[in-house]
Structures are given as C-alpha cells and as structure tokens.
Image: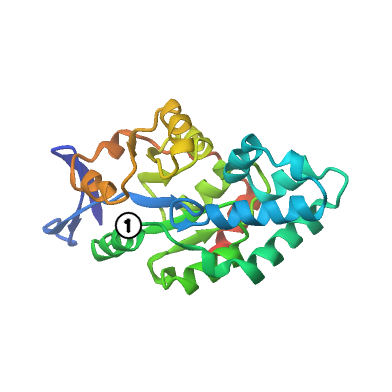
Amino acid sequence: MGESYNCGNRGFVMKKDKDNKVLETVEEKPVIVLSFDGTVMDTEPAIIATYRELFDRHHKNELFTKEIQLAALDDSVYAVMQYCFPEEDTKKMVQEYNSWQRNHLSDLIQPMHGIKDLLKWLKKHDYKIATVSTRERASIVELLEHAHLIQYFDVIIGGKKSNTVDTDGLFMALRLLDAKSCVYISDSSADIMVGKDAGVFTVGFASNADKAKAIVEERPDFATADLMQVKKLLKGEALWLAYDIHYPQENSETKKKVKKDRRK
C-alpha cells in the first residue's frame, strides 16, 4: 500500500510491502493536458482558410473581419457557425466546414514547432498525456495519426459545442488519468481561464503574437513562446502541487460516461 508525502517541494509516493518496509520511492508526476489547435498542431492557417472559403461561399466576406478571425481561433466551429450563420442549419455548416478542411487542407496542418520533442521527453519520463479540444475527436485522431503523434497520448477528448474547452472535458481527461495534479498547456486565453476555474497549474503558450496579450492578461501560472520551456518547468520546483483540482461532485450520468470512455 502506498503512502504519499512531499519532500523538498517535490511529490513522491512510497511503496511498501506487507511488513511496512519501503520498497521504492517514486516521484508523483502531474498529468499533462494540452489543448490541440495551436498547441499540439499548427491548425491556424487551415482554420482561417476554411472559414474564408465558407464565408465566401455563403456571400459573407465582409463579415469575416480581423475580430471574427481571432475569435474563430478560440471558439468552437459550432459556436462560430451559430453566431455568424444564424439563418443556416448549424450542424450542416459544421459538417461543411469539416468536409472542406479534410478534403483540401489536411496536409497544411503540421505539428507545432517543438511539440514532438516535448512529447518524446514527456513519454520517456513516464508522464501521462492528454489533449482536450472542441474539435471533433475523429478529426483529432486523424491529424495525430497523419503526424505520427498519436502514440504519445493516453487520452483524447474532443467534440464539444461550447465556445472553449469547458471544465467537463478537462475533468473527464483528469478523471480518466486519475490525476492528483495537472499542468494544463494552451495557446488560448479562454482555456487558461477554464484551467484556473478547474484548479490546475496553467501554462500559457503564446504561439500567436495576436493572442499573447490576451494570454498574459489571464495571468497563467507560467507563460512561454517555446514549448521546450515546459521541460525546464517540469524539471524545476513542483509548483503544481500547491494546486488542488476542483473536481465537481460526480452524478450517475458522469460516472457512466467516464466508465464508457475507459473502455474505448
């Protein structure tokens, strides 16, 4: 039976035998959760190009302003379609978006600079890794397989309709990985706010100069424009241990959903 304790601001778990003799001391690592678009994969050019095509196709070019473009990079496709095309069937617009991007721009979507090296290092050092996104899960899996990155992820959560990765999706990933602590990395100011609400250690990844100001204003626990700085963060003091994940009370439906996802 294991006993947890802190030592020098690092988290460790002692494994003991039946006679209470210490067998080994293992460092307790945080679960690493990354947003997908803009953190794992450089999807921004494809996202903007796809929206531009749809706005043109539906004769709404004048509505695709710089403000809408920035919002579209943070919001779910469902939310953007609902807001910008209220006269259309939102589900059909989302299908149109996904279909055009898949058929025309999949090869344009490449891994973010530094992400593969970071994922390799995390996996080598036995970190559990998840990605959480509003993008459809099938699309995430397809892009990760195409980039030969899928083997690094223990959990993939996708398909939310809300404007950002809400706490339900984040909590589902944390529950599936039995997280006691978490480092949540995202290039979205909205996701940083979600992470703070969830009680996890947040890392703002300023991959886009237009987003950097908004990310800094959300005051993440750590901010960087270089993903490999996350490696240095994890090798330093375990600051995430000072954060308690604010797990909500599970109702029966949530428990059923988590159990179902564990079987996938």
Quadrant for residue 260, please give it: bottom right
Q: Residue at x 58, y 39 (%)?
A: 70
* Residue 198 shows in the view: no
Above or below: residue 215 compared with residue 177: above
Q: Is residue 20 left or right of residue 224?
A: left
Count how many numbered circles sit on residues in the image: 1
Residue nearest the observer in this picture, 232 or 49: 49
Up the image or down, 15 lies above or below 161; here it is below
x then y, percent, for residue 88: 86, 50
Location of the N terminus (image quadrant): bottom left
Q: Nearer the viewer, residue 211 or 123?
A: 211
- Residue at the image point whose x is 66% and y is 57% from the top: 50
Q: Residue type at mark 1?
A: Gly
Q: Is residue 260 above or below residue 235?
A: below
Asked whether, in this view, residue 89 is left or right of residue 245, the answer is: right
Q: Nearer the viewer, residue 40 or 127?
A: 40
Q: Which residue is mark 1?
A: 114
Q: Residues within 10 Å of mark 1 (few under 14, many from 20)?
A: some
Q: Position of residue 102 (x, y in %)?
A: 64, 68
| Quadrant assignment for the C terminus | bottom right
Question: At 30% from the left edge and 39% from the top edge, which residue is drawn?
Answer: 240
Q: Residue furthest right?
A: 87
Label 1: element kind: loop
The picture places residue 32, in percent across and down from the top left corner, at: 37, 52
Q: Position of residue 72 (x, y in %)?
A: 63, 44
Q: Is residue 230 above or below residue 218?
A: below
